[in-house]
Structures are given as C-alpha cells and as structure tokens.
Image: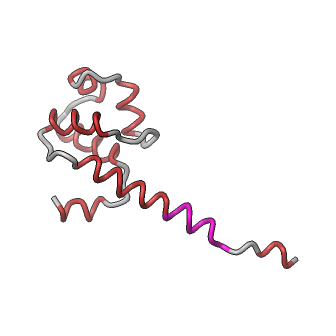
C-alpha cells in the first residue's frame, strides 16, 4: 500500500474512488445506495468538491474491501498538497509597491 500511496499523494480521494467504482462496474448511485449514503454526497466527493470524512471513508473501504484508513490517508496528503499550494502562492513578494 505504501508504494501506491506515494504515487497518489496529492490526488483527491474522490478521484481514486471514482476510478475504483469504474473498475468494478458500479455506478455512484447504486454504490451510494449500497452504503446507505446520499448519491449527491458521493458525487461531490468524486468531483473533488467535498472532502472525505472518517465515517464515510470507513463505510467505503469496508464495502470495497480496501484497507482501513486508505481514503483518509489520501485525504490528508491532498490537504497537505493544497496547503502548500496556497502558501506558495501567497509567498511571492508584492512588487506593485515599486511602481
């Protein structure tokens, strides 16, 4: 799992989930119903518009027989990457004061 995680660092867990569902020929709607979740919630996560939470990650991992904690680890790596991106954008000096 460690090697796979290093490849996926910084990728939103929803993208990985969508790929996994496609591999298993499952629609988001039927999978959402299977895990007793709203299809809109799963749709927002797979589009990267919503973060994965612990309870949902556990339900998904259990249903797909994926190692526990996998999606939350991806979420943390994604959050770290996003924070680095935000901070690097803010660290550029404001050269407009020299005009």
Residue drawn at x 20%, y 60% is: 4
State the residue lying farthest toward the right: 99
- The kind of secondary structure the magenta stretch mainly shows is helix
Residue positioned most to the left: 65
* In front of the other: 45 or 28: 45
Q: How many marks?
A: 0
Pick the quarter of the image with the C terminus: bottom right
- Which of the image's four quarters has the N terminus? bottom left
Q: Is residue 58 left or right of residue 76?
A: left
Name the spot of residue 67 as percent of width and height, x first.
14, 47
Q: Position of residue 6 (x, y in %)?
A: 26, 65
Residue 30 image point, x, y percent:
25, 23
Figure quadrant of residue 98: bottom right
Image position of 84 (left or right of 39): right
Most extreme residue toward the bottom is: 98
Residue pictured at 22% horizontal, 25% vertical: 35
Residue 58: x, y in percent? 22, 37
Q: How is the image coloured?
A: secondary structure
Occupied quadrant, residue 42? top left
| Residue lying at 15% horizontally and 44% vertically, measured from the top left | 66
Q: What residue do we see at 30% from left, 24% from top?
A: 37
Highlighted magenta segment, given as a residue range: 84-92
Tell me, yes or no, whether the highlighted magenta stretch contains residue 4: no
Question: In the image, is 81 to the left or to the right of 5?
Answer: right
Establish if 36 lies above or below 47: above
């Amino acid at each position: 799992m460690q090697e796979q995680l290093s490849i996926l660092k910084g990728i939103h867990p929803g993208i990985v989930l969508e790929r996994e569902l496609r591999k298993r020929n499952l629609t988001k709607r039927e999978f959402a119903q299977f895990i007793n979740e709203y299809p809109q919630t799963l749709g927002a996560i797979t589009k990267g518009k919503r973060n994965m939470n612990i309870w949902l990650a556990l339900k998904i991992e259990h249903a797909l027989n994926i190692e526990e904690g996998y999606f939350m680890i991806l979420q943390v790596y994604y959050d770290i990457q996003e924070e680095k991106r935000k901070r690097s954008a803010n660290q550029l000096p404001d050269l407009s004061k020299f005009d």
